[in-house]
Amino acid sequence: MDPSIVLASKDAVTGSLGAVAYGLAAIGPGIGIGLIFGLGVQAIARQPEAEQVAFRYMLIGFALAEALALIGFVVPFVFP
């Protein structure tokens, strides 16, 4: 294998480590949001009369999980 090809391929890899970190950081809130709504639908199916309360808690949990994702998005720009 030609060494110049190996050097060219190493130099071609550019990008932001922050973008990679955000991609990894978005996994946690994504799983959390899925669990929140999945278990919330299950709770409503088990007790339809408690739909208002369950839905309220689902939205609060969603907002908190989404805030973590947004913080993960902002941090790489604040601390380069």
Image (tube, rainbow, N blue to C red):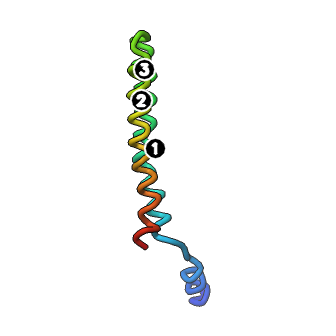
Q: Which residue is drawn at 39% across and 35% down?
A: 61
Q: How crowded is mark 1: few (under 14 residues within 10 Å), some or many (20 or more)?
A: some
Image quarter (top left, top right, bottom left or bottom right) of the C terminus: bottom left
Q: Residues within 10 Å of mark 3 (few under 14, many from 20)?
A: few
Q: What residue type is labelled 1?
A: Gly
Q: Earlier in the sequence, mark 1 or mark 2?
A: 1
Q: Which amino acid does label 3 sit on?
A: Gln
Q: Which residue is drawn at 40% across and 40% down?
A: 32
Check disc 1 and report the residue beneath it. Answer: 30
Q: How crowded is mark 2: few (under 14 residues within 10 Å), some or many (20 or more)?
A: some
Check disc 2 and report the residue beneath it. Answer: 58
Q: What residue type is labelled 2?
A: Met
Check disc 3 and report the residue beneath it. Answer: 42
Question: Alpha-carbon distance for marks 1 and 3?
Answer: 18 Å
Instruction: Give how far across and how far down residue 19 sits, in percent.
Output: 50, 64
Instruction: Give how far across and how far down residue 78 sits, in percent.
Output: 42, 68
Using the image as rendered, state which of residue 73 and residue 5 is in the foreground: 73
Using the image as rendered, state which of residue 11 and residue 46 is in the foreground: 46
